[in-house]
Amino acid sequence: MLQYAVMAIETPPDATTYRITLFFGPEPVDDDSTIQSCVFNVKKRSWKAGIQVAVDIGADQLATLQDTIRHTDQLRKALEPLPEDDRADAAARIPDLTAQAIAWCKLDLRLAAGLQQENQRILYNELIPELNQAVMTSRREYVITYILTELDLIP
């Protein structure tokens, strides 16, 4: 398992062979507000160069998963001690950070199955049940930790 901040984050066994960074997102795909996309730079240790992988998620799926995560006690408790203005700013960032973390989970699902060394897009209608299952169970803590880390709220 990889460690970020002080909390362990579950990753697919093969994910440690990749270096992944968020390039940008979430953003609407082709001005279509029903699909959001995050783009990641992915570099496998054995590759000479990295690739870009766009990860698309349908707005309905994203909204359902975000709603589940946003109302967790961990996030609410982490925001409580902040001054009101800071709390509002942090709360405003949560939807984008949640989308990034969920897209990262979807990318990890693809990495577990293997990835060709070419720029690619994971379409919004791929891996839907797998992503729902992962975010609701095994990757839930990862999503929460990602959000708290990006908000600098990890002790």
Image: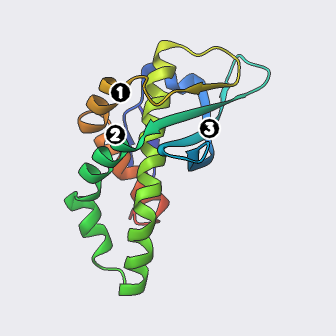
The percent position of residue 129, horizontal first and vertical second, equals 30, 25
For label 3, the crowd category at 10 Å Cα-Cα, with few meaning under 14, some 14 to 19 and many 20 or more, is: many
Residue extending furthest toward the right: 48
Examine the image and state in which quarter residue 77 appears.
bottom left
Name the residue tied to disc 2: 61
The residue under label 1 is which amino acid type? Ile
Amino acid at the residue labelled 3: Phe
Q: Mark 2, residues whose alpha carbon is within 10 Å: few (<14), some, or many (≥20)?
A: some
Would residue 6 be visible to someone looking at this image? Answer: no
Q: Position of residue 96 (x, y in %)?
A: 47, 56
Outermost residue toward the left? 73
Quadrant of the drawing holding the N terminus: top left
The residue identified by callout 3 is 40
Q: Which residue is mark 1?
A: 128
Earlier in the chain: of badge 3 and badge 2, it is 3
Tell me which residue sits at (51%, 35%) in the image: 56
109 up-or-down from 100: above or below: above
Question: In the rendered structure, are the residues bearing label 1 and label 2 in contact, judged by CB atoms less than 8 Å apart?
Answer: yes
Could you tell me if the residues under marks 3 and 2 are in contact, i.e. CB atoms within 8 Å? no
Could you say which is closer to the camera, residue 30 or residue 154? 30
Helix, strand or loop status at disc 3: strand
Please say if 93 is above or below 37. Answer: below
Q: Residue at x 51, y 21 (%)?
A: 111
Q: State the residue in front, 9 or 129.
A: 129
Amino acid bearing label 2: Gln
